């Protein structure tokens, strides 16, 4: 790509010089359209850099957005595709995404998973006062959507199982008991809503939950899983088995479920901000309901760069997802092992409390979400978070009073991890309380009765000794301190 000048528009190359054979139909179409369009008499003045070419702000535009901003277009079909009724490059890109994730169908969304959740629930809650059993720990967008639909919602409260990370999860027995009771009462639930992978690393084994639910509530068929943080999980064998879209293929008995899952692709894949995916598995009619809901709720000005980034992100994970996830897993282990073994990191520890019995079997901890406890510093986790950013240019989003959450996503590199560990060492060196000075007795310390020294000259006075002296005094004995006069 040539450098932009004030005299000529940007030039685009439709394809890299060489790359592995992988289909990216929407990304290719956007590149081709950007390269072949001289001017647009429709919209988007900044397209091809036209409106800023001679602007004194051009350098700021270029520095912030690079050439990608200028490839954006409002061209639809032809030569690209219509967003709401795709039948060309976008339709093919969504088809490839569905195949990659193991879904019956997939819809692209450019306005974030908040909107994707609203679209999904618009399609799933189709009657007034629909009965919904919902995880109370889901994203606010789900609560708002269910309220707007006037659904009859019964919430299940997650159980906090780690006070430092504040991680919480539903007990399987709570889900099954509520579903079975509704079935016995003749008022089964129409929909189950779960937060499949939480912000702080709690992961449900969705196939295991649905297998138990199939017996507890035979009438329940519709399942909605918010997997906003879990798109990456589909591309590694150790994590794929717990995912929502894997559930229907896990056992024949689970094929009766209609499953909808949403992914914030920008959170864990190489996609642009607000890039989101809605997947469905099961009844094809559900796909039509989702498309209609997207038509009702989505902006009519979708960002084609975001759409193309979804196409490219899917292709990347098919090509190298296993290796990228494996790197994240390795770097997570490197942090945990180094913190455990390095005395210069002794002020920190990784929260790894065992799951209680009520959660064992259907709950796991995402190994790429590390909860780092801060226990040996003179500051708490919030101030540590601020220092990491202001002094070391390392950003951590989530913290509790005692712990930081480290998200080791596929964009975290080994040099980033080493920089984090070095920063923690530096902060510990500057803030960890100095070791207590050893106190050596120069006297005999003797309780009477019985007149037997507790300490003789030259011995260290430790905390155990002080507690023993206090106990002797509490029992009524007197303490005599006799100076050592030996020379």
Image: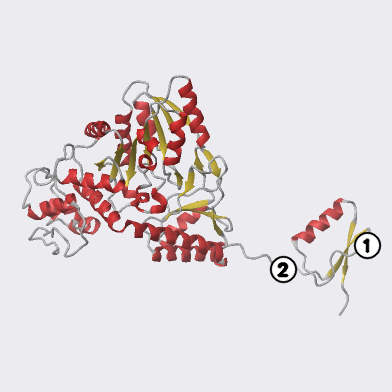
Q: Is residue 99 left or right of residue 469?
A: left
- Where does the image place residue 409, in percent across and percent down from the top left? 38, 55
Q: Residues within 10 Å of mark 1 (few under 14, many from 20)?
A: few
Query: In the rendered image, which quarter contains the C terminus?
Result: bottom right
The answer to whether marks 1 and 2 mark residues whose Cβ atoms lie closer than 8 Å is no
Closer-to-camera residue (405/28): 28
- Where does the image place residue 205, in percent across and percent down from the top left? 44, 43
Mark 2, residue position = 438
- Where does the image place residue 467, in percent across and percent down from the top left? 79, 56
Query: In this picture, is 162 found above or below 458?
Result: above
Say whether residue 135 is visible: no
Circle 2 SS class:
loop
Residue most toward the front? 252
User: Residue at 55% of width from left, 55% of height from top?
Assistant: 374
User: Residue at 42% of width from left, 44% of height from top?
Assistant: 197
Mark 1, residue position = 451
Query: In this picture, is 310 found above or below 393?
Result: above
Residue most toward the bottom? 487
User: Residue at 31% of width from left, 34% of height from top?
Assistant: 120
- Numbered disc total: 2
Query: In the rendered image, which quarter contains the N terminus?
Result: bottom left
Closer-to-camera residue (62/128): 128
- Where does the image place residue 272, in percent across and percent down from the top left? 27, 50
């Amino acid at each position: 790509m040539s450098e932009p000048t004030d005299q000529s528009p940007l030039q685009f190359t439709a394809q890299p010089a060489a790359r592995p054979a992988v289909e990216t139909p929407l990304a290719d179409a956007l590149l081709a359209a950007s390269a072949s369009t001289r001017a647009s008499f429709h919209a988007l003045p900044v397209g091809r850099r036209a409106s800023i070419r001679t602007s004194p702000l051009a350098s700021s535009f270029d520095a912030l957005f690079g050439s990608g901003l200028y490839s954006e277009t409002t061209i639809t079909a032809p030569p690209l595709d219509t967003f709401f009724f795709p039948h060309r490059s976008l339709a093919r890109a969504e088809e490839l995404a569905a195949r990659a994730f193991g879904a019956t169908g997939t819809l692209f969304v450019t306005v974030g998973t908040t909107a994707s959740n609203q679209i999904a629930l618009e399609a799933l809650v189709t009657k007034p006062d629909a009965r919904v059993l919902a995880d109370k720990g889901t994203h606010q967008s789900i609560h708002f959507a269910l309220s707007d639909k006037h659904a009859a919602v019964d919430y299940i409260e997650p159980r906090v199982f780690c006070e430092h990370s504040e991680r919480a999860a539903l007990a399987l027995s709570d889900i099954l008991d509520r579903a079975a009771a509704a079935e016995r009462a003749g008022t089964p639930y129409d929909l189950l809503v779960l937060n499949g992978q939480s912000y702080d690393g709690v992961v449900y084994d969705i196939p295991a939950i649905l297998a138990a639910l199939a017996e507890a509530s035979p009438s329940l068929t519709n399942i909605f899983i918010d997997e906003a943080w879990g798109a990456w999980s589909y591309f590694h064998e150790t994590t794929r088995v717990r995912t929502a879209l894997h559930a229907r293929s896990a056992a024949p008995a689970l094929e009766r479920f209609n499953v909808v899952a949403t992914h914030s692709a920008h959170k864990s894949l190489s996609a642009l901000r607000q890039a989101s995916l809605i997947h469905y598995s099961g009844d094809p009619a559900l796909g039509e309901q989702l498309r209609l809901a997207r038509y009702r709720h989505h902006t009519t000005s979708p960002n084609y760069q975001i759409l193309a980034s979804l196409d490219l992100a899917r292709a990347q994970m098919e090509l190298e997802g296993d290796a990228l996830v494996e790197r994240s897993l390795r770097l997570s282990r490197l942090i945990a092992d180094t913190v455990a073994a390095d005395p210069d990191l002794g002020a920190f520890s990784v929260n790894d409390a065992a799951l209680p019995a009520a959660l064992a079997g259907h709950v796991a901890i995402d190994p790429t979400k590390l909860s780092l406890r801060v226990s040996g510093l003179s500051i708490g986790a919030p101030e540590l978070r601020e220092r990491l950013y202001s002094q070391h240019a390392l950003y951590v989003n989530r913290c509790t009073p005692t712990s930081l959450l480290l998200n080791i996503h596929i964009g975290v590199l080994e040099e980033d991890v080493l920089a984090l560990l070095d920063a923690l060492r530096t902060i510990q060196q500057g803030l960890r309380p100095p070791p207590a000075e050893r106190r050596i007795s120069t006297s005999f310390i003797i309780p009477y009765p019985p007149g037997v020294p507790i300490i003789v000259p030259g011995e260290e006075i430790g905390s155990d000794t002080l507690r023993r002296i206090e106990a002797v005094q509490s029992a009524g004995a007197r303490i005599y301190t006799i100076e050592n006069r030996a020379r």
